[in-house]
Image (tube, rainbow, N blue to C red):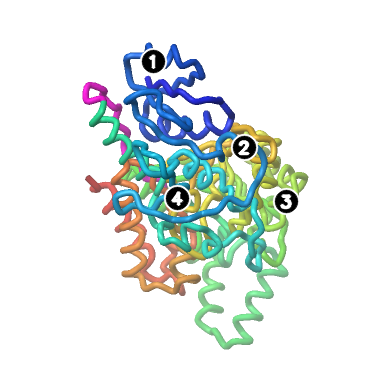
Amino acid sequence: MLLVYTHKITPRLTYTFKHFFTRILQIQVKFTTKVEEFIAHEGLKLTYSKQALGSEIFIRSTNLLFEQGINDAEIIMGEWDGIACFFQTRQEATVPFDVFAATFYLLSRYEEYLPHVKDEHERFTAEESIAFKYNFLEKPLIDIWAYKFKNLVKDKFSEFQFPEREFEFISTIDVDVPYTFKHKGLMRGLSGYLKDLSKFRLYDIWYRTIVNLGFRKDPFDTFEELLNYQKQYKIKTLFFFSLGDYSTYDKNTSFRNSKYQSLIKSVADYAEVGLHPSYFSYKDETLLQKEKLRLESIFNRPVEKSRQHYLRLAIPETYQNLINLEVKEDHTMGYADHYGFRASSCTPFYFYDLEFEIQTPLKIFPFAVMDGTLKDYLELSNKKSFEVIVNLAYEVKKVDGTFITLFHNETVSNRGRWRRWRKMYIDVFKKLTTVK
């Protein structure tokens, strides 16, 4: 156990220390404001205040973890043995910056509460983040700080044994469009034929026809293969199904369609299933609740996992709505326009609500890379995309974290723009099951 002396115990402080030490470094933390108790403690201990009490590990605190509300904090970047850092302190300390204030700033998504420019879908973009601006978006910086700090503790308390955690890979699949041809309904099916005809896509007309007649499997119906990969490579796979109404941005099969319902039930028998809330739900609790109830009625169990469509995330509104509806996990924390670590950590963490100054029960699972980011936003080749995925995984492996990818069921269809991506998906599995 680690004993921490501080002049004031706050929700921000306990939240940050528990993520840094308990979730990343696997050690329990206790806090005290009593100097006598701290001095008498003979085990692992740390002072987080303005002055050191003795020769213990000392981090000079800035004000962030003792404040309330949002202030426009000045960010000046520095380095700690070649690693990016900020909230630097001038006084002698074990490390040259307030590592806990910096951790809280990144993890709470403090910068997303500040004024910023949104994209066309009202999203906070990677380019607006300090991680992108200062070139550490591709590194789980908080976990790196923690592991570096771990080495400092080992030097000072050589008898202390840190528990070890293990690298984990989670593959997540968003199901925006479960079928490309089948189960669209009469009007949407006819519209597809007319669109192909207007562009003289005769092969697509033929292919659409034989799929609809049942002579060929729908190309986007890749669920059996995805479940087989999970079993073969022993990689945990999560599926997020869309249950929204049809709109410009939501083109899923109707939730009333019996074939779609059967698909969801069959996938849920072999993998964990969550909700993929529709485009317009991210600030609409009533709409979110309606879609959640639809999914629950299909597979007869509470919906505990969610990821927003188009990764539309309004902090704190989206998370507050999910909490109100008793969703336990959200998987939206990542960027559409760039790969990397939006919250600068590869360790799942709990959402801290800066409006109410509390740690919430909603656990955030940050993903590192999305297929559409590589293919559509950055227009990378298949080879380069594979290298990006593997390099991100290796960064996570260095700190024994959780590496999460976001693919879609259509990605492994090998059709159209996703040609040869099935092989890449399998190659990622093969590569990461041998990561040492």
C-alpha gap between disc 2 and disc 4: 18 Å
- Cα distance, mark 4 to mark 3? 32 Å
Residue named by callout 3: 283
Examine the rendering and report whether any part of residue 266 can be seen.
no
| Residue 39 numbered tag | 1
Give yes or no for residue 296 being in the magenta stretch: no
What amino acid type should be assigned to the residue bearing mark 4?
A: Phe
Q: Would you place residue 92 above or below residue 78 in this image?
A: above
Q: Amino acid at mark 1?
A: Ile
Task: Give how far apart the Cα atoms at labels 3 and 2 are.
Answer: 28 Å
- Tell which circle, 1 or 3, labels the residue nearer the N-terminal end: 1
Task: Report the disc number at residue 67.
Answer: 2
The residue sitting at 56% across, 48% down in the picture is 109
Residue 40 image-quadrant placement:
top left
First in sequence: mark 3 or mark 2? 2
Task: Give, as a three-letter code, the residue at label 2.
Answer: Glu
Seen in the image, is 86 located left or right of residue 251? left
